[in-house]
Image: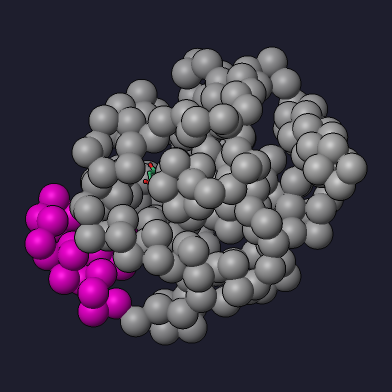
Amino acid sequence: MVIAIDGTSASGKSTNARLVAKALGFVYVDTGAMYRTLAWHCLQAHIDVHNARAVTAACRRWKTKLACVDGHVRLLVDGYFPEKEIRTAEVSVAVSVVATVPKVREWMKKKQRECIQFGNLVMEGRDIGTNVFPETDYKYYLDAHLEERTKRRAAEGVNENLAARDQRDSQRATAPLMIALGARVINNSNLTSEQTSSMILEDMRQRLAAEAK
Ligand code: DC
């Protein structure tokens, strides 16, 4: 079973996906972290992220391994997960550029689908319900006002132009950010993460109970 949680940047996908996964005993997958890890790798290797051919070649050569640690899936590079390194402002700018490369998205989709080997999943990203697991019945789309999302990022110590990233994510040609057909849309501008995750959990419980009848 896969619960897909998509949405704009800083709409609370990670926090809520973690809470939902923990409550249900599912494995949590942050697909943004996978794209960020590739962007970080390109920056480390001095690959121009605007050069789609170079990024594609780097992705093809890339030696990685999927691992599940404490219920979270990690994409390891030489056995290492660059947890802090992938959250810098530099990586945040580079990531939505590498995420536009069609071959990169193909590679990521394959890896992300392989995550099912670890069990039932709560997978968050931009194209999970539309492209990675379009067959799942459990799709959610989170959003919040731009001002609120900018405040949330600033509280984490990151000042970035979220409007520009939203625009790149929703206007790219391959698997752009959009609301999947049948997704439950939650605007959580005025909700805490406990309230948002409770809404998802309540909805899931009702649906699973109805399906069990
Ligand atoms: O969720 P995040 O901010 O860590 O994601 C970083 C970037 O990765 C995001 O700007 C676009 C890209 N991404 C994507 O294109 N598709 C996904 N499923 C997840 C992330």
Residue, x 49% and y 24% (percent of image)?
Answer: 150
Residue, x 62% and y 42% (percent of image)?
Answer: 137
Q: Magenta stretch mostly in which secondary structure?
A: helix
Left or right: 5 as drawn, with respect to 134: right
Left or right: 22 as drawn, with respect to 108: right
Q: Is residue 23 visible?
A: yes
Judging depth in this view, the residue of 191 and 119 nearest the camera is 119
Left or right: 26 as drawn, with respect to 82: right
Judging depth in this view, the residue of 24 and 1 nearest the camera is 1
Residue, x 13% and y 56% (percent of image)?
Answer: 52
Q: Is residue 154 visible?
A: no
Q: Position of residue 110 (x, y in %)?
A: 40, 66
Q: Position of residue 201 (x, y in %)?
A: 80, 38
Left or right: 79 as drawn, with respect to 193: left
Q: Position of residue 87 (x, y in %)?
A: 46, 51
The answer to whether residue 160 is magenta is no
Residue furthest front as drawn:
213
The answer to whether residue 51 is magenta is yes
Range of the magenta residues?
37-62
Q: How is the image coloured?
A: one colour
Q: Is residue 96 above or below residue 69?
A: above
Q: Say which quarter of the image contains residue 56.
A: bottom left
Residue, x 58% and y 58% (percent of image)?
Answer: 29
Q: Is residue 76 above or below residue 204?
A: below
Q: Quadrant of the C terminus?
A: top right
Q: Quadrant of the N terminus?
A: bottom right
Q: Is residue 133 above or below residue 62?
A: above
Count of numbered circles on the image: 0
